[in-house]
Image: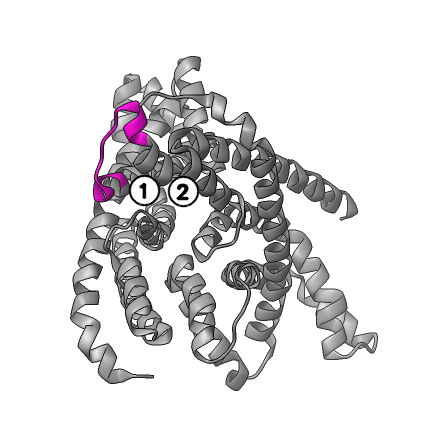
Amino acid sequence: MDFDLILRVYPYFLEAALVTIELAVLSIILGLACGALGAYARLSRWASLRFAGATYVSVIRGTPALIQLFILYFGGPQIGIQLDAFEAGVIGLGVNIGAYMTETIRGAIIAVDKGQIEASRTLGMGGWQTMRYVILPQAARLMIRPLGVNINAQIKGTALVAAISVVELTYTAQRYIGSTYKPFEMFFLAGIIYMVIIYATGLGINWLDRRAQIK
Amino acid sequence: MGLDFTVLPGYFDALLLGSLWTIAIMLVAAVISFFGGILLAVIALYTPAIIRYPFRVFSFVFMGTPLLLQLFLIYFGLIQIGIDLPAFVAGVIGLGLHYAVYNSDIIQAGILAVDKGQHEGARTLGLSRGQTIRKIIVPQAVRTVIPPIGNNLIALLKDSALVSVIGVAELTLTSQLAISKTFRPFEFYLAAAACYYVINLGLEYGLRQIEKRVAAAR
């Protein structure tokens, strides 16, 4: 293990880690939006919306994220979508994790006891009021932990955008492996940074989950 | 540049071959991840701390870092210490180990869910500790955790696209080669996505059959 080398290159890795974090945060926000919309569609009264939601989930979860990124980034210009690598990364990863989050959010909503809906309707609340004041607050508690699993997966998933040459952590490690021929050192460095990011996120999710539980 | 799907039929054979390679990678990696998962689970639950802890670190590292990085390490890193693996071997080992760690978590839960009386009963009948684990506990545990392991297998199929970056000529790399000749990324990646989707449907069907048989055997 060449620690001198690690000490020399680590600032570049930290810079790249910022890009990884940026990618993760933006794509997770987009993913949550897609997930909420998807869950809304899948639970909708209208069959066409339900079908659209189900198709979104099935197609995205049935194909590799890498291929989705490639279609968007390399294939996009053919149908008039010009994105730079970072934008394609955020949108591709966000839409991808959104399909998984759709199922997480939908699962949490349908896990809320049916009696709750009946009771609020009996009390004279409308459909939206029931959702807003009765179902969602309870579902939100249930979905924190499974969404945490999605988020954890997404942080590691950001490594994929190295394949469309976004200069994030994995791409940086790969580039330094190429120029120094020291794969173990570079893996060690990048790996530790990923683990710190994931560990810190995990602590955040646990804190949120503990806070959200009713004592 | 518009879309022109008429270029696809000329590469039908190539895409088919790529799909077969993807299936082969998935199957080999699935076997490694299944038995590796059982081994890791047994180590985590039944061995003394001195063996258990190094493996726990191993699991922590494999769960906490991206698969892509692990593939680079196995393929390019092992060359540094003199082990030159062919890309296919490096790819299936990387995929297999990555998912072995995930399977191990599930199988551990399955082992803990097996009734304690089974262990006591087996020992009373004169089976050794190793025999009890191998012949009584693990088979029952694996049966209960087939569905979540199946989910991991579906994830593994999709992650198999990553081995294209270390140069295994599976479906993704095959489409990239076709694109480099035709300059038609949208058409070929869409075709590749369709192939993955079909393989995925087949896999899901297969998993349902296995689940049914396992449920019937119980």
Q: Residues within 10 Å of mark 2 (few under 14, many from 20)?
A: many
Where, quadrant-wise, is the N terminus of chain B in this rendering?
top left
Disc on res. A65: 2
Foreground residue, B19 or A53? Answer: B19
Which numbered dot is residue A122? none
Q: Quadrant of residue B138?
A: bottom right
Residue A164 visible to an observer of this rendering? yes
Q: Quadrant of residue B113?
A: bottom right
Instruction: Choose the circle earlier in sequence order: 1 or 2.
Output: 2
Q: Is residue A199 visible?
A: no
Please tell me whether mark 1 sits on a helix, a strand or a loop: helix
User: Around disc 1, counting alpha carbons within 10 Å, would you say few (fewer than 14), some (14 to 19), or many (20 or more)?
Assistant: many
Residue at the (20%, 73%) spot, across then down = A9
Q: Position of residue A4 (x, y in %)?
A: 23, 84
Q: Amino acid at mark 2?
A: Ala
Position of A92 relative to A126 (above/below): below
Read off the chain for label 2.
A
Q: Of all residues shown, which one is farthest toward the bottom?
A: B50
Residue at x-position 52% and y-position 43%: B171
Q: Which residue has dot 1 on it?
A: A93
Q: Main secondary structure of the magenta part?
A: helix
Q: Is residue B71 left or right of residue B218?
A: left
Asked whether B45 falls inside the magenta stretch, the response is no
Instruction: Name which residue lies at 40% across and 58% down.
Output: B68
Residue A105, horizontal then vertical, whole percent: 36, 36
Q: Are marks 1 and 2 in contact (CB under 8 Å)?
A: yes
Which chain is indicated by disc 1?
A: A
Q: Which residues are magenta?
A: A76-88
Q: Which quarter of the picture shows residue A81? A: top left
Could you tell me which residue is drawn at 27 percent across and 49 percent down? A212
